[in-house]
Amino acid sequence: DIVMTQSPDSLAVSLGERASINCKSSQSVLYGSNNKNYLAWYQKKPGQPPKVLIYWASTRASGVPDRFSGSGSGSDFTLTISSLQAEDVAVYYCQQYYSTPPLFGGGTKVEIK
Amino acid sequence: QVQLEESGGGVVQPGRSLRLSCTGSGFTFRNYGIHWVRQAPGKGLEWVAFISFDGDYRESADSLKGRFTVSRDNSENTLYLDITGLRAEDTALYYCARDFEERCGGDCYLDSWGQGTLVTVSS
C-alpha cells in the first residue's frame, strides 16, 4: 500500500497570509508513461462532504479559486493557499490514486490565527 | 446535475449486519466506478471499498476484508455496502463517491460525493 503522510497536523494562519500543507507518499505516484502524478487534494468542512480542489497534483478543479495551488512530483507534494480567507477554514486531505487502495493522508486542519 | 445519495444508516447493535445503499442520478451510473469512504467522529477520511463500473472488479481495505462487501445493481442505479459483524469502531459517516472518469479502473480521483449516511454501532 502507498501510505500518505501529511504535515503539519494543524496550522493557524492570519487572514490574507499564506498557508502551506505538505504531503509525502511512501512511494512515487508519478506514472512514467503519461508523466502524471496521481495525487489529489480535498477540502472537508464540517457538515459537508469532501470537495476535490486539485488533481494530477497541480490541476485546479472547476470553480476552485486560484488562491489554491498544488505543486510537487514523485513523492513530495504541497498544497498552498496564497491568501487565506475565512471560508478556507477546513481540514485538507491528500489522496493518491496511483494504486489501490487509494489512501488518504491524515489531514491538516487550517484555522485562522 | 450529478447526485449521489446514501441511505441505510442508523443505530445498530454490535455484531449485527447492515446494508448501506448509494443511488446515483444525473449521470450514466453504469459507466462509473464508485468508492465508499468513511469518517469516524473526530477522525480523518478512510477509504473503505471500490467497485468498478461493471462490477467485475471490487476491492476493500485490508483491515475490513471479510466484513465489508461492495456490490451494485446498474439497472437500479444503486450501489450497496454490506457490513457484517459490526463493531464500535465502525461508527462513522459513510460516503459514496464517484470516479471522475468513465470506466476508470480505480485509479481516479473522486469528483462527486454524497452527503453521507451515519452508522452508529452501540448496544
Image (cartoon, coloured by chain):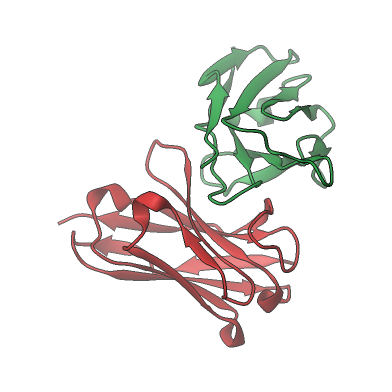
Task: Identify the colour of chain A in the image.
Answer: green
Q: Residue furthest left?
A: B123
Q: Quadrant of residue B18?
A: bottom left
Camera sees residue B37: yes
Residue B106 x %, y %: 63, 58
Q: Quadrant of residue B51?
A: bottom right
Residue B20 in the figure: left or right of residue B121: right
Of residues A24 and B35, the one nearer the viewer is A24
Residue at point 61%, 26% (across, down): A24
Of residues A64 and A93, the one nearer the viewer is A93
Task: Identify the colour of chain B in the image.
Answer: red
Residue B89 x %, y %: 28, 47
Residue B118 x %, y %: 39, 57
Camera sees residue B92: no
Residue at point 69%, 45% (across, down): A52
Residue at point 69%, 39% (across, down): A39
Q: Quadrant of the C terminus of chain B?
A: bottom left
Residue at point 79%, 44% (across, down): A61
Residue B46 x %, y %: 46, 45
Q: Residue furthest bottom?
A: B75
Q: Quadrant of residue A86?
A: top right
Looking at the image, is B109 positioned above or below residue A9?
A: below
